[in-house]
Amino acid sequence: MKTVLITGGSGMIGRRLSELLIEKGYEVIWLSRERYIKADIPRYRWNLLTGDIDDDALEEADVIIHLAGVGIAEGKWTEARKRMIVGSRVRSAQLLLDKLKSMDTKVDAFITDLLLQTKYSQKKMNMMLLIF
């Protein structure tokens, strides 16, 4: 069965998604601030500030689901907060993609919850972005 690497796996969505994937027979691993391979769901280390990602996690992954970023439910959605939410997701997604490219590692899918905030006819749109 395929291995799914989840960033933000310890969050509300990540935890539930992990449970569902495991029930379906997928191997699930997380990128986390701490490495703990012997956990029920193995955790590999990444550090967004330094740009470090545990190569082993990316080498094992068939699919990456990127959920990490500033929490969307943690405060009022001011313009500054919206920039933080989007920025955190864009920077971390770019780090993952750059690392994959530098390792010449291929995955079957890279899925992100990247929240794109766009003003269109004075309306705000939220979009799920899937990158294959």
Image (cartoon, rainbow, N blue to C red):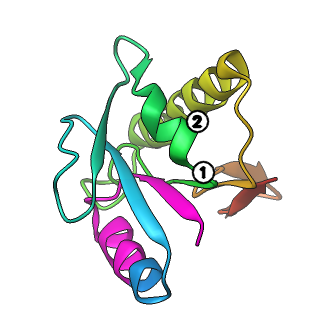
Magenta residues, as a range? Answer: 1-19
| Residue 43, visible in the rendered structure | yes
Q: Is 48 on the left or on the right of 12, as rendered? A: right
Task: Identify the residue position indicated by label 2 in the image.
Answer: 93
CB-based contact (under 8 Å), mark 2 and mark 1: yes
* Residue at the spot 57% in from the left edge and 31% down from the top edge: 96
Q: Nearer the viewer, residue 77 or 1?
A: 1
Instruction: Name the mark nearer the viewer: 2 or 1.
Output: 2
125 sits to left or right of 30: right
**Label annotation for residue 114:** 1
Local crowd size for mark 1, using a 10 Å CA cut-off: few (<14), some (14–19), many (≥20): many
Quadrant of the image containing the N terminus: bottom right
Q: Tag 2: Cα neighbours inside 10 Å, few (<14), some, or many (≥20)?
A: many
x and y, in percent, of residue 74 in the image: 24, 55
Q: Earlier in the sequence, mark 2 or mark 1?
A: 2
Above or below, 22 relative to 96: below
Q: Quadrant of residue 128?
A: bottom right
Residue shown at the point (45%, 39%) measured from the top left: 57
Q: Is residue 45 magenta?
A: no
Please state which amino acid type lies under the numbered disc 2.
Answer: Ala
Outermost bottom residue = 23
Three-letter code, disc 1: Leu
Q: Is residue 11 magenta?
A: yes
**What label does residue 88 carry, if any?**
none
- Residue depicted at x 56% and y 49%: 61
Which residue is located at x 48 percent, y 53 percent? Answer: 5
Residue 123 visible (yes or no): no
**Cα gap from disc 2 to disc 1, whole angstroms:** 8 Å
